[in-house]
Image (spheres, helix red, strand yellow):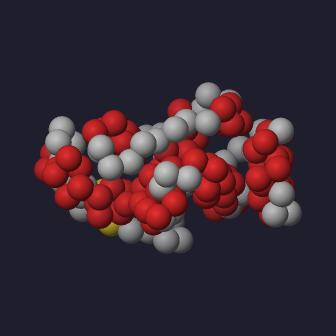
């Protein structure tokens, strides 16, 4: 398992093999660890050399595909990430985190979309995570900071 360096470093002691996510009961049992992994990914900078980060992202995707309790819609704004695999992982971690922390809103696509992109904007806008901001990402962060994110995402 891994420990991620950073201001909010957390140890990830999740045993991914414990959760094959092939049935509803296993997916439900995995939820606390899924949330833990999503939070760890969002609380640490991207490190492409860290295999455990990739394993964590893979675990989230496996759970997202397997859980019958939630439906995850990928909205067209994912193009803001420019196809960056690492930032796409941040998007999925944000989508999972928002959904699991707000189960009453899980079926409200607009709320999930906005909540997810707020988390993404907070992540990419955090200088500690050393994300190279493209023009689109700068606009995303600016919209989030100016409380105009919902309008920005509709454009």
Q: Is residue 24 left or right of residue 71?
A: left
Q: Is residue 52 visible?
A: no
Residue at 23 percent across and 55 percent down: it is 28
Q: Is residue 9 left or right of residue 36?
A: right
**Closest to the observer: 151 or 63?**
151
Image quadrant in which the C terminus is located? top right
Comparing 83 with 25, the one in front is 25
Residue at 29% in and 58% down: 31
On the picture, is 12 further left or further right than 123? left
| Residue nearer the viewer, 54 or 143 | 143
Q: Residue at x 42, y 42 (%)?
A: 71
Q: Residue at x 18, y 38 (%)?
A: 22
Q: Give the quadrant of the N terminus.
A: bottom left
Residue farthest along the bottom direction in this orientation:
8
Q: Position of residue 40 (x, y in %)?
A: 42, 61
All told, the count of numbered labels is 0
The image quadrant of residue 118 is bottom right
Q: Residue furthest top?
A: 83
Task: Report whether residue 107 is seen.
Answer: yes
Q: Measuring from the top left, give residue 8's x and y in whole percent.
A: 49, 71
Give percent across and percent down for residue 45: 54, 54
Q: Position of residue 12 (x, y in %)?
A: 30, 61
In the rendered view, tell whether residue 95 sits above or below residue 20: below
């Amino acid at each position: 398992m891994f420990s991620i360096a950073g201001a909010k470093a957390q140890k990830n002691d999740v045993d991914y093999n414990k959760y094959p996510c092939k049935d509803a009961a296993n997916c439900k049992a995995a939820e606390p660890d899924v949330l833990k992994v999503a939070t760890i990914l969002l609380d640490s900078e991207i490190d492409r050399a860290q295999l455990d980060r990739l394993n964590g992202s893979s675990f989230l995707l496996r759970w997202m595909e397997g859980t019958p309790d939630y439906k995850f819609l990928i909205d067209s704004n994912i193009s803001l990430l420019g196809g960056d695999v690492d930032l796409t992982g941040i998007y999925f971690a944000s989508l999972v985190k928002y959904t699991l922390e707000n189960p009453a809103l899980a079926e409200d696509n607009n709320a999930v979309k906005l909540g997810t992109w707020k988390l993404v904007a907070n992540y990419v806008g955090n200088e500690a995570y050393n994300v190279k901001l493209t023009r689109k990402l700068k606009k995303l962060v600016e919209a989030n900071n100016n409380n105009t994110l919902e309008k920005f995402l509709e454009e």
